[in-house]
Image (spheres, helix red, strand yellow):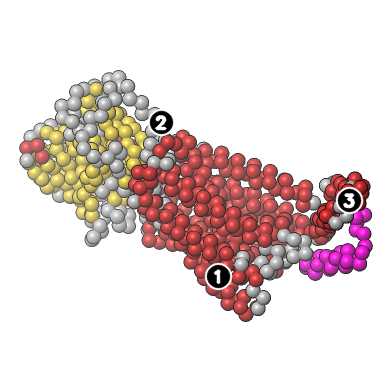
Amino acid sequence: MTLTIAPRVRALVLLLLAAACALLAAAGTASAHAAVTGSDPGQGAVVDKAPARISLTFSEQVAMSDDSLRVLDPEGKRVDTGKPSNVSGTTYAVPLHSGLPDGTYTVAYQVVSADSHPVAGAYTFSIGAPSKTSVSVSGQSADDGVVGWLYGFGRYVSYAGFIVMAGGAAFVLACWRRGSGVRPVQRFVVSGWVALTAATLALLLLRGSFTGSGKVADVFDLSLLGQVLQTKTGAALVSRLLLLAAAALFIAVLFGAYDKREDAQEKRDLTFGLSIGGVVVAAGLAASWAMSEHASVGLQAGIAMPVDVLHLLAVAAWLGGLGSLLVALYRAPADTPVDRPAVRRFSQIAFGSVLTLIATGTYQSWRQLGSWSAFTDTRYGQLLLAKIGLVVVMVGVAWISRRWTGRLAETAPVEAVAVREKERVGAGAEPAGDVATTDAGDGDAPATAHSDTDTDTDTDTDTDEHPGSERAAQLARQQAARDAARQKRMRDADPNRFGLRRSVLAEAGIAVVLLAVTTVLTQTEPGRTEQEAKAASSSSASASSGTGASGALTLNMPFDTGGEDGKGIVTVDLDPARVGDNEMHVFVERPNGRAFDIPEVKVEFTLKAKDIGPLPVVPDHIATGHWSANGVQIPMAGDWQVDVTVRTSDIDEVTVSKNAQIG
């Protein structure tokens, strides 16, 4: 049976890996975690006078290089001067040449978000009147192309390698404690270490091109590698490589000194030491993801990072142990099979891991989505629903596996068959006929037995000439065929063990696809951020429409004070936005558009060109999220800077700014 099932196992794994690659390739342009929530001038805006600078507001802090913000004229020539700077909070600006002529200008940006993912895009605005432009704004995503695909695949392999290595080692320590027969699992764990090490090195090389030009030729650019090493992601990858050196030592001891220990007390002591060391190394490796990606930024980062580490460790214990169990069931020697106590111990570990995943996954979902509607309205939420569905299916198959485990026969009868078989061979019995009879049902081994018989006939003459070496080789081939047939017969003697193998194989197949979905999920913009960006864009579009209709000035400015409930959008309405008396209304809304109150709002007007201001205005609270002030004096026309100070608690305060033509 083993000879016929193994190709099916390989084919299934290859098929599932292909599905995983397809999911990774489909990540597309949505794989950015910071979003543009505002711009000045706005997208598609037509301004009467050339602005002094271009500013972009993001949903979180971003890292910028000298070329992160570029402004191109209709001919495609750069008109920005200097390098981008952080003007306030999450708003970044770049100055422009003075006296720019009328026409359509293109703003292109390429930055790296705080959770290590590249963000790129472009939009246009016009001075005076729109015109034709030779600049294309398509294809701006930083993770498109070969480099982006390779980086995504490298992330998948790194996750898989960690799960195989950490989960497999835990399976050997906690479940399958026998010293013999663990060689297939050892190869499985070592392959996980090799995969994780190779993927980490590849990610380190790909990182510079992935967050920059996206060109394959830049992968081996040492100057880019030097820049990567100075970033948070580069430090995390280097730390991961150092921890992998410690993991190599752990694996060497686990399958070396630990495997050879015969004294029960010594083995218990070594098990305790290896368990502590293994948890420390595995937690450190998991932290290399948590400290550089989603969990490291945003809401409750101090809680989210240890929760993310715990989540990754639970995934490794469940899925990595599952893979090790599958290898043990299919590849372990028949005289030392994985026994029922080992399967039951793993079942208990898997159950605890699932409970941990439910708890940590619920927290992560709340943190990344923020609302029930994000499950269906955002790509992140849709992927999360797919992941939850796969987990539910996998738990259902695991329940079937537990039933097989409960009915699993003790290993004693199988071992008795092995002893009797060895006694027959030792007594000089000729089991060749048994081999042929047993293998006839399987359809593979009879050819092996027949081949040996033919070899015996064909080599009679050679045996006379070389009676020693040829006869020894012939006997070795016959013995190997008998051993293979005997192991298959013993392995398949228990139908419950056969059923367990099939259900565990199904679990492992689902796990491969589940890991692919999870990898894409970590590269996708969180639902909370996506909804905030949509709300800001909607408010901006609504304000633009209102301005055109009434002549009043409306400014929308996202803010983040950094505290609890510190994110929102403040809107300033100035009517009729002219020299003299004006009526001002200030509205404060959450990212989902719901009005809410804060302790204090202050507004200041400054005309830097004439050295006027700041002119402070403290509006009166009218209703929830609404403040108003009458008789706001604007002494002269010009490009006024409007500063709004928002205080959400006794200590959490931020000032956001925007320039506007008044009068």
- Report the residue marked by disc 1: 274
Q: Is residue 235 left or right of residue 556?
A: right
Give residue 371's position: percent from left, percent from top.
43, 49
Decide which of 274, 639 is in the foreground and name it: 274
Q: Is residue 581 left or right of residue 61?
A: left
Q: Residue at x 20, y 34 (%)?
A: 81
Q: Which amino acid, by three-letter code, is at mark 1?
A: Leu
Q: Which amino acid, by three-letter code, is at mark 2?
A: Gly
Give residue 21's position: percent from left, percent from top.
56, 41
Rendered position, 633 above or below 441: above
Q: Report crowding for label 3: few under 14, some 14 to 19, many 20 or more residues within 10 A (C-alpha).
A: few
Q: Which amino acid, by three-letter code, is at mark 3?
A: Glu
Pointers 2 and 3 in contact (C-beta within 8 Å): no
Tell me the quadrant of the picture where the C terminus can be found: top left
Mark sitting earlier along the chain (2/3): 2
Label 1 – label 3 distance at C-alpha: 56 Å
Q: Report crowding for label 1: few under 14, some 14 to 19, many 20 or more residues within 10 A (C-alpha).
A: many
- Report the residue marked by disc 2: 139
Which portion, as a residue range, is magenta?
410-436
- Report the residue marked by disc 3: 465
Confirm whether residue 363 shows in the render: no
Confirm whether residue 197 shows in the render: yes
Q: Nearer the viewer, mark 1 or mark 3?
A: 3
Q: Is residue 308 left or right of residue 345?
A: left
